[in-house]
Amino acid sequence: MAGNLRGRHFLKLLDFTSAEINDLLTLSATLKNNKRAGVRGHTLDGKSIALIFEKPSTRTRCAFTVACIDEGAHPEYLGKGDIQLGKKETVADTARVLGRMFDGIEFRGFSHETVEILAEYAGVPVWNGLTDEWHPTQILADLLTVQEEFGRLNGLALAYVGDGRNNMANSLMVGCAKVGMDVRIVAPESLHPDQGLVAQVEEIAAATGGSVTVTASVEEGVAGAHAIYADVWASMGEEDQIASRIELLKPYKVTQKMMEQTGRNDAIFLHCLPAFHNHETVLAKQYPDICEVEDEVFEGPQARAFDEAENRLHTIKAVMVATLGN
Ligand code: CP
Ligand code: NVA
């Protein structure tokens, strides 16, 4: 490992060097191979891990849970309404209580400030399982998936198409720039990322040989891209904006034509999931035009979303093992 990550929090990728991120990817690949070979880990033997969820989750919750069990730890799910976080007790007080009982704490929720307060007061490693601003564990899974596909990350181009100012866009910009990739945010102007963050990412990219482009033009944004990435048009907590987002983002739906506009036969499609790609879910029935990727792409040969979902397990395990493991 480039640096010893033991005892560190994992709140956002801006806090980690390129070498540390690459090391976490290497560890993820090792843990994935071990799991496939049936080799059990013991690096978290006897540890207890708190999993706090203010927002719902399939992949993140299951990845943390299974990763804990694979490495010998006990996961404890603390859902919205189960604990006093911020309601009858301050976040700092809850953090100090949980830190006396648990060896590590995962948090998924709304305000990024909550996970920062947990980290400040818990006295044990705190991992961000998604906030309104950042989703750092997702990016490790995305990068691992791209690396598995192309054998490298440096110099590859990834175009994120959709809501350019959400947790995924923010985190992908930082993560891709850190590993020397050419990252493009393709979004209507009203959903372009924060300019201060773009400036920070430009500095990172200048040091790694990567680059960052923000554009409203699909044609410009996807040309030459090795990967096209989509996320939902309205994130958790933004349900009241679904109708206006549909109007704004309809021209940014990932289609087979858009995959072809990359000009690369080997381009892949990525999605953090959950995805609107057909009309079978409750929300999709309510909003027939909500669909960030057409089924032809989502179910097609270029799609890697389920490899990516599996990689959530191996990468989240790597984060816990690196920061807390024996
Ligand atoms: N990608 C992701 O974070 O999925 P969940 O919301 O199901 O955890
Ligand atoms: N931007 C999405 C990501 C889900 C994994 C959300 O926050 O809902």
Image (cartoon, rainbow, N blue to C red):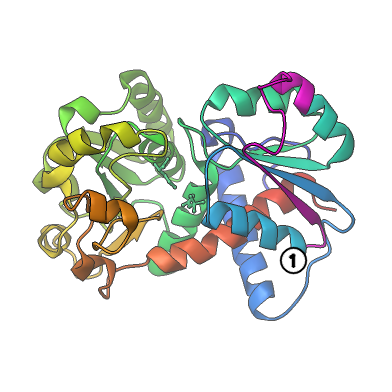
Where residue 323 sits: x, y (%)?
A: 74, 44
Report the label total.
1
Question: Of residues 231 and 308, which is closer to you in this image?
Answer: 231
Provide the residue designation for mark 1. Answer: 70
Q: Is residue 26 visible?
A: no
The answer to whether residue 87 is left or right of residue 47 is left
The stretch drawn in magenta includes residue 84: yes
Where residue 132 sits: x, y (%)?
A: 46, 31
Q: Name the residue rendered at 13%, 62% in the picture.
A: 263
Q: Residues within 10 Å of mark 1 (few under 14, many from 20)?
A: some
The answer to whether residue 16 is left or right of residue 103 is left
Residue type at the position of mark 1: Asp
Q: Name the residue rendered at 75%, 76% in the picture.
A: 39
SS of the residue under disc 1: helix
Q: Is residue 40 visible?
A: yes
Where residue 274 sits: x, y (%)?
A: 40, 55
**Some atom of ligand 1 lies within 8 Å of the CB belonging to the residue at label 1:** no
The stretch drawn in magenta includes residue 186: no
Q: Quadrant of residue 308?
A: bottom left
The answer to whether residue 138 is above or below residue 206 is below
The answer to whether residue 193 is above or below residue 80 is above
The answer to whether residue 105 is left or right of residue 233 is right
Where residue 171 sits: x, y (%)?
A: 44, 38
Q: Name the residue rendered at 41%, 34% in the picture.
A: 237
Q: Name the residue rendered at 35%, 22% in the picture.
A: 199
Q: Quadrant of residue 214?
A: top left
| Residue range of the region highlighted in magenta in the rendering | 70-94
